[in-house]
Amino acid sequence: MINNDRNKTVKSTLSDLKADVKIGKVGNGYFSSEKNASIFFDYGLSDTVNKLPDNVRFADFGGGEGFLAYMIKKLLEQRGKKVIATVVDANYKYLEEAKTYALNTLSDDIASCSLQDQDFIIMRSVNHYNSLEEQYKILKNCHRSLKSNAFIISQILSGTEQDCKLMSALLNHPLLGRAQTPNQFHVTSKNAFTSMLQETGFTKIQIAGYAPSVNWGPHILWERYHKAEMDLAISNNDIHQAKEINAQKQLFLKDCVELITKHIKKYTKETHFFQDNNANFLIDLLFPIFRCARN
Ligand SMILES: C[S@@+](CC[C@H](N)C(=O)[O-])C[C@H]1O[C@@H](n2cnc3c(N)ncnc32)[C@H](O)[C@@H]1O
């Protein structure tokens, strides 16, 4: 086991920790779904298994609770490989879960952790937790951590150029209370991610496929980041605190509705934002699975 002494604070992961988010439950269990993990494997890895060595070493950067790494390890073992899988994440609570799958864990910033000689690196829905500048650092660190003929597979949360801008604005919204600094979170478009991969030195860049979509929107974000604190206020019978949280929620949602309504009006044809039957604004996320080679 790799030790976990380097329990670094990474700004972008603090809000999940504070709100006690269980990532396996987010998006109706998107990140703990066997089907979604198998799709990731089918698009990203199935056609390259034969080219991998018998003893495979891979890392899951921002691997959270480790379910995806566990599934990928299992699917490779079923195909006769011996596998050492390491989940790197800055959320120590998620890593506690990852340890239950008997995976190596490393509590660290994926922009600076010092793994090496990996046959491949996987990432799923990690990019947008980081600013654009950090995303470059992460890709550079992936490049450094890989063997010379190795590759990365990264499923990114994305959308049209304009939808990405709006999603970033919602994630960084001061009333949501997730971001500590402006532009801390950044949703990257497919074109921007492709350029970033090229600039970092990756080649053979392709979108191997699209992972299942999931709905995402302001009220979902609010619940994710404020349910725990609201539950606590209610269980403490702290009516004042509960009212304050609710007032902030109403302001946040009102502002989001204004932003999204304007956006839909302006980009009617190309946007994936919509209003559902309960009058909630949502977006159908685009989840391209990128694959590219170190050289
Ligand atoms: C949406 S979760 C996805 C978890 C996992 N990849 C999966 O598919 O189940 C994003 C994860 O990336 C981690 N993460 C994002 N940026 C990070 C960074 N700079 N360093 C370490 N972990 C990071 C978060 O802590 C979180 O666990």
Image (cartoon, helix red, strand yellow):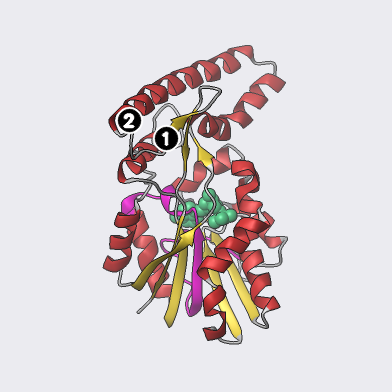
Visible residue check, residue 87: no
Residue 78's image quarter? Answer: bottom right
Contact between marks 2 and 1 (CB within 8 A): the answer is yes
Q: Which mark is residue 95?
A: none
Q: Which residue is pictured at 39% across the width and 29% down the height?
A: 174
Residue 273: assigned label: 1
Mark 2 or mark 1: whose residue is earlier in sequence: 2
Instruction: Quickly name the residue at label 2.
Output: 263
Q: Is residue 26 inside the magenta stretch?
A: no
Say few, some or many: other residues with alpha carbon within 10 Å of mark 2 (under 14 / 14 to 19 / 20 or more): some
Asked whether residue 206 is in view, the answer is yes
Residue found at x 37% / y 43%: 184
Q: Residue 98: x percent and y percent?
A: 66, 59
Outermost residue on the bottom side: it is 54
Q: Which residues are magenta?
A: 105-133
CA–CA distance between discs 2 and 1?
8 Å
Secondary structure, mark 2, is helix
Mark 1 nearby-residue class (10 Å; few <14, some 14–19, many ≥20): many
Mark 1: amino acid: Phe
Residue 145 picture location, percent across and down:
44, 74
Residue 288 pos. (x, y %): 44, 56
Of the 4 image quadrants, the one containing the N terminus is: bottom right
Q: Residue at x 66, y 72 (%)?
A: 75
